[in-house]
Image (spheres, rainbow, N blue to C red):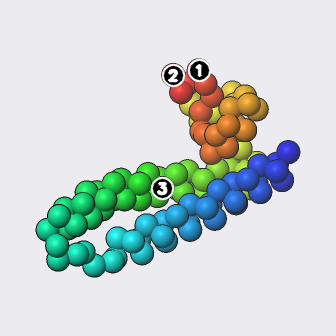
């Protein structure tokens, strides 16, 4: 089970690193001189900035989950210490809290 979770977390980390690289490359592109295109590109950049922020947060959580897994602390709720339900961990493998504490 731990190896499967570890592999899922590593795959998620790789996906996020690739996503961040693509977003950063897109944000580095120059903007059009055409006003209407410039406006659209500016709006797109705002959306990309938000996606970038969320991806960085998720990447941090994934890294922390990998660390907990390697330190045999994975699956314990950081708030109450109880074991996080397997189904919750399968759905959100980098969660730090059980469903009761998350609500």
Circle 2 packing at 10 Å, graded few (<14), some (14-19), many (20+), is few
Residue at 41 percent across and 59 percent down: it is 52
In terms of depth relative to the viewer, which is nearer, 93 or 38? Answer: 38
Residues marked 2 and 1 touching at CB (< 8 Å): yes
In terms of depth relative to the viewer, which is nearer, 34 or 66? Answer: 34
**Left or right: 98 as drawn, with respect to 70:** left
Q: Mark 1 points at which residue?
A: 100
Q: Mark 3 points at which residue?
A: 55
CA gap, disc 3 and disc 1? 25 Å
Q: Name the residue under label 2.
A: 103
**Left or right: 26 as drawn, with respect to 30:** right
Tag 2's secondary structure?
loop
Tag 3's secondary structure?
helix
Circle 1 packing at 10 Å, graded few (<14), some (14-19), many (20+), is few
Q: Is label 3 or label 1 in front? A: 3
Residue at 56 percent across and 31 percent down: it is 79
Q: Position of residue 67 (x, y in %)?
A: 66, 56
**Left or right: 75 as drawn, with respect to 21:** right
Q: Where is residue 66 in the image (x, y as percent from the top left)?
A: 68, 55
């Amino acid at each position: 089970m731990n190896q499967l979770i570890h592999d899922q977390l590593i795959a998620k980390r790789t996906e996020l690193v690739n996503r961040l690289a693509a977003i950063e490359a897109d944000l580095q592109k120059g903007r059009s001189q055409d006003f209407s295109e410039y406006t659209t590109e500016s709006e797109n950049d705002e959306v990309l900035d938000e996606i970038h922020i969320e991806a960085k947060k998720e990447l941090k959580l994934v890294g922390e989950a990998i660390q907990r897994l390697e330190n045999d602390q994975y699956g314990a709720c950081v708030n109450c210490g109880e074991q996080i339900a397997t189904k919750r961990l399968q759905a959100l493998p980098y969660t730090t809290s059980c469903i009761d504490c998350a609500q």
